[in-house]
């Protein structure tokens, strides 16, 4: 089964990769000149350098995206990121799905929504 994952275009490739490694447990599984695919236990995310030849000239660095990352202990994780000085967009509260979450900025200004794991119903083909 194929995975759908986000690919961010960034003019801050190294700090973006470090952010997702340091705070969200991602590790690089593919590293090529100007491209890194990262994986953690259940998720993939990729980052292209904005100057990479695969990125069209008219494409701008990432904006208007929210990356969602589940975490077992939202409050404890929030406390850690807050104490480390990360820029917080939204403090812990209950989201539209009834789960505790908070939102932090990544190095590109992308919002990262950290939320309690959700039970998502299985897909049933018609």
Image: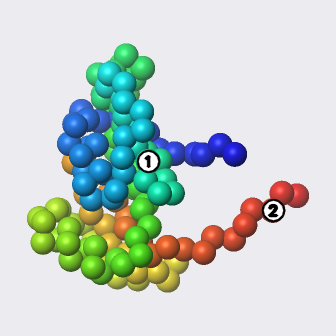
Q: Quadrant of the C terminus?
A: bottom right
Number of marks drawn? 2
Quadrant for residue 22, please give it: bottom left
Left or right position of 67 against 2: left
- The x and y percentages for residue 55 are 39, 23
Q: Residue at x 32, y 22 (%)?
A: 33
Locate the N terminus and report the quarter of the image it occupies. Answer: top right
Q: Is residue 12 above or below residue 65?
A: above
- Residue at (37, 67) in percent of width and height: 114
Name the side, left or right, on which 2 lies relative to 115: right
Looking at the picture, tell me which residue is in the foreground, 126 or 23: 23
Residue 102 in the image, given as x and y percentages of width and height: 32, 72
Which of the two residues, 27 or 66, is positioned nearer the viewer here? Answer: 27
Q: Position of residue 17 (x, y in %)?
A: 28, 43
Q: Which residue is mark 1?
A: 39
Q: Is residue 110 visible?
A: no
For disc 2, the marked residue is: 124
Q: Position of residue 82 (x, y in %)?
A: 17, 71
Relative height, residue 80 to residue 2 (above, below): below
């Amino acid at each position: 089964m194929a995975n759908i994952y986000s690919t961010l275009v960034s003019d801050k490739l190294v700090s973006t990769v470090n952010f997702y490694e340091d705070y969200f447990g991602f590790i690089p599984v593919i590293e090529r000149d100007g491209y890194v695919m990262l994986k953690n236990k259940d998720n993939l995310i990729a980052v292209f350098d904005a100057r990479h030849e695969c990125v069209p000239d008219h494409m701008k660095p990432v904006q208007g995206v929210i990356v969602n990352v589940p975490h077992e202990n939202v409050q404890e994780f929030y406390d850690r990121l807050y104490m480390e000085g990360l820029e917080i967009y939204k403090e812990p509260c209950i989201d539209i799905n009834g789960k505790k979450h908070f939102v932090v900025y990544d190095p590109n200004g992308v919002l990262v929504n950290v939320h309690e794991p959700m039970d998502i119903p299985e897909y049933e083909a018609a």
